Image (cartoon, grey):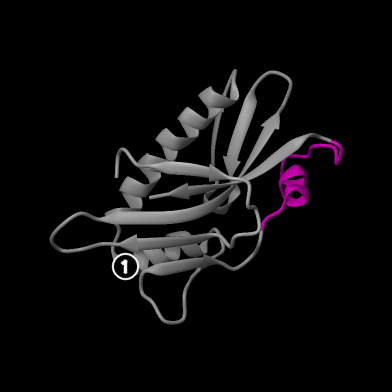
């Protein structure tokens, strides 16, 4: 996957999904819609994708996003190489499930919101947190 295109949108109501196409010949691709959360912890900006348990951080939001995209690209590269049953097992640990009519589309079974993220990090409810959607193609 390495380099990929990503778009940030404020439409946070879109359902999270992963479309994974692994061909025997030709390029392997992942298209994804993932919810991201941005938190300023006072020292660093942390950008999270809880649906995949991935995060990046930096002194600026741009630094955090760059790190997040690099880690996300590495993760996508690694799951593209997994056998199908291992892929299903790996993603199911994070609450992903295959769609009923496809062997390629995964859907998030448990929606994640900012209250869940704040609770996971032990942060007060009044902590500023920004939600957005990351679309990867």
The verdict on residue 67 being magenta is no
Asked if residue 46 lies left or right of residue 123, the reply is left
- Give the secondary structure at mark 1: helix
Where is residue 101 shown, x and y percent of the image?
42, 81
In the image, residue 23 sits, relative to residue 120, either above or below, namely below
Q: Is residue 105 left or right of residue 113?
A: left
Left or right, residue 81 beside residue 69: left
User: Which residue lies most toward the bottom here?
Assistant: 101
Q: In the image, residue 35 lies at what x, y percent?
A: 59, 50
Magenta highlight on residue 122:
yes
Measured along the vertical axis of the image, is residue 94 above or below residue 132? below
- Report crowding for label 1: few under 14, some 14 to 19, many 20 or more residues within 10 A (C-alpha): some
Q: Name above or below for residue 61 compared with residue 10.
A: above
Residue at point 54%, 28% (across, down) = 64
- Identified at 59% across, 35% down, the residue is 47
Q: Which residues are magenta?
A: 112-126
Which residue position holds label 1? 84
Question: Based on the displayed image, in which of its 4 quarters is residue 102 positioned?
Answer: bottom left
Residue closer to the observer: 6 or 34: 6
How many tags in the picture?
A: 1
In which quadrant of the rendered image does the N terminus lie?
top left
Residue 134, position in %: x, y? 52, 46
| Residue 38 in the image, given as x and y percentages of width and height | 65, 36
Q: What residue lies at 39% left-to-right and 56% top-to-bottom?
A: 31
């Amino acid at each position: 996957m390495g380099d990929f295109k990503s778009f940030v949108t404020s439409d946070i109501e879109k359902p999270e999904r992963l479309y994974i196409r692994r061909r025997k010949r030709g390029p392997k691709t992942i298209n994804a819609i993932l919810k991201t959360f941005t938190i300023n912890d006072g020292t660093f900006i942390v950008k999270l994708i809880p649906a995949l348990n991935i995060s990046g951080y930096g002194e600026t939001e741009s630094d955090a996003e760059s790190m997040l995209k690099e880690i996300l690209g590495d993760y996508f590269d690694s799951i593209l190489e997994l056998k199908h049953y291992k892929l299903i097992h790996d993603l199911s640990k994070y609450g992903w499930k295959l769609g009923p009519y496809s062997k390629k589309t995964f859907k998030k079974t448990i929606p994640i919101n900012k209250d869940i993220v704040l609770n996971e990090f032990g942060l007060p409810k009044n902590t500023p947190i920004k939600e957005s959607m990351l679309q990867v193609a």
